[in-house]
Image (tube, rainbow, N blue to C red):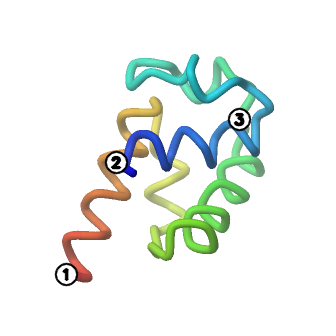
Amino acid sequence: MNTHTAVAGVLATVSGVDADKLGPEVALESIGLDSLALLEVALAVQKDLGVAVDDGDVAGARTVGDLVALVDDARARVA
């Protein structure tokens, strides 16, 4: 599973928006993710994907693509 698919799955679970509608350009705010929901996303990424991402970095993400890049960067640091 590629990173975008995995992150879209996490976002779909948290936001209730179909993962197929979560392209890289989709703004996280537009799918109802506020700062509290983004904290939930960070925790879900760690639990579901096994990747620790910084809460502050996740809070700074504006789009699905930004979040995918954060996960990719975190995976690269571990590898």
The C terminus - image quarter:
bottom left
Q: Residues within 10 Å of mark 2 (few under 14, many from 20)?
A: few
Q: Is residue 75 left or right of residue 12?
A: left
Query: Tag 2, which secondary structure?
Result: loop
In the image, what residue type sits under mark 2? Asn
Query: Tag 3, which secondary structure?
Result: loop
Q: Residues within 10 Å of mark 3 (few under 14, many from 20)?
A: some
- With respect to residue 78, does 59 lie above or below? above
Q: Which residue is mark 3?
A: 33
In the rendered image, which quarter is residue 20 located in? top right
Q: CA distance from mark 1 to mark 2?
A: 16 Å
Q: Position of residue 3 (x, y in %)?
A: 37, 49
- At 25% from the left and 62% from the top, the residue drawn is 73
**In terms of sequence position, does the residue under pointer 1 or pointer 3 come before the other?**
3
Looking at the image, how many numbered discs can be counted on the residues?
3
Of circles 1 and 3, which is in front? 1
Of circles 2 and 3, which is in front? 2
Q: Which residue is mark 1?
A: 79
In the image, what residue type sits under mark 1? Ala
**In terms of sequence position, does the residue under pointer 1 or pointer 2 come before the other?**
2
- At 63% from the left and 73% from the top, the residue drawn is 47
- At 63% from the left and 49% from the top, the residue drawn is 10
